[in-house]
Amino acid sequence: IALIVGGSMVVGCHRSPEERIEHISAKIASKLDFNESQKGLLKEIADEMKKDFAEEKALRRSKFDEAKSLLLADALDTSRVKSLFRERQARMDEKVDKYLEKISALHKTLTPEQKKEIIEKAEKFQKHFE
């Protein structure tokens, strides 16, 4: 599921991030023929992603502005650049932990057929990068 969600985030660039999340969630639910319970769990994940994206928006802007300042400086402050990357990674690690709990709950409800479909989609997606 994470592969599908992550990979699908690169499509539909003409949509807002929130619209992409909605579109991808609907597509996942449709392609995997989710039941109402599964749709509810997926909606919880999507809603949380939209909330997190909105909260991160201002932070991303400020970090981008800081990165521009670093690039415009006469000498690159490599320790600050490393620090920015570490901060970003720490935020991502927090999100992984949070989403894995929700994805695990959804995973428990998947049928063998749905799991097979996810594997097929992931393999197809992987071929794009070979």
Image: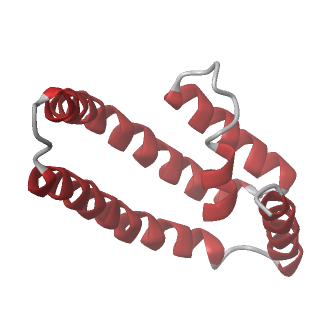
Where does residue 23 sit, x and y in percent of width and height?
A: 68, 34
* Quarter where residue 103 is shown: bottom right
Horizontal side of 120 relative to 68 (left or right) equals: right
Which of the two residues, 121 or 33, is positioned nearer the viewer here?
121
Where does residue 57 sit, x and y in percent of width and height?
A: 30, 31
Whether residue 51 is situated above or below residue 42 in the rendered picture: above
Q: Residue at x 51, y 29 (%)?
A: 18
Quarter of the rendering occupied by the N terminus: bottom right
The colour scheme is secondary structure
Horizontal side of 83 relative to 117 (left or right) equals: left
Where does residue 108 sit, x and y in percent of width and height?
A: 63, 79
Q: How many labels does the image show?
A: 0
Whether residue 45 is situated above or below residue 50 in the rendered picture: below
Looking at this rendering, what residue extends furthest in the front direction? 74
Which of the two residues, 68 or 3, is positioned nearer the viewer here?
68
Which of the two residues, 80 or 21, is positioned nearer the viewer here?
80
* Quarter where residue 58 is shown: top left
> Would residue 55 be seen by someone viewing this image from the given angle?
yes
Whether residue 11 is situated above or below residue 112 in the rendered picture: above
Horizontal side of 110 relative to 56 (left or right) equals: right
> Would residue 1 be seen by someone viewing this image from the given angle?
no
Q: Which residue is drawn at 82% across and 47% down?
A: 30
Q: Which residue is drawn at 27% across and 34% down?
A: 60
* Quarter where residue 126 is shown: bottom right
Horizontal side of 112 relative to 97 (left or right) equals: right
Where does residue 130 sit, x and y in percent of width and height?
A: 80, 64
Whether residue 106 is situated above or below residue 76 in the rendered picture: below
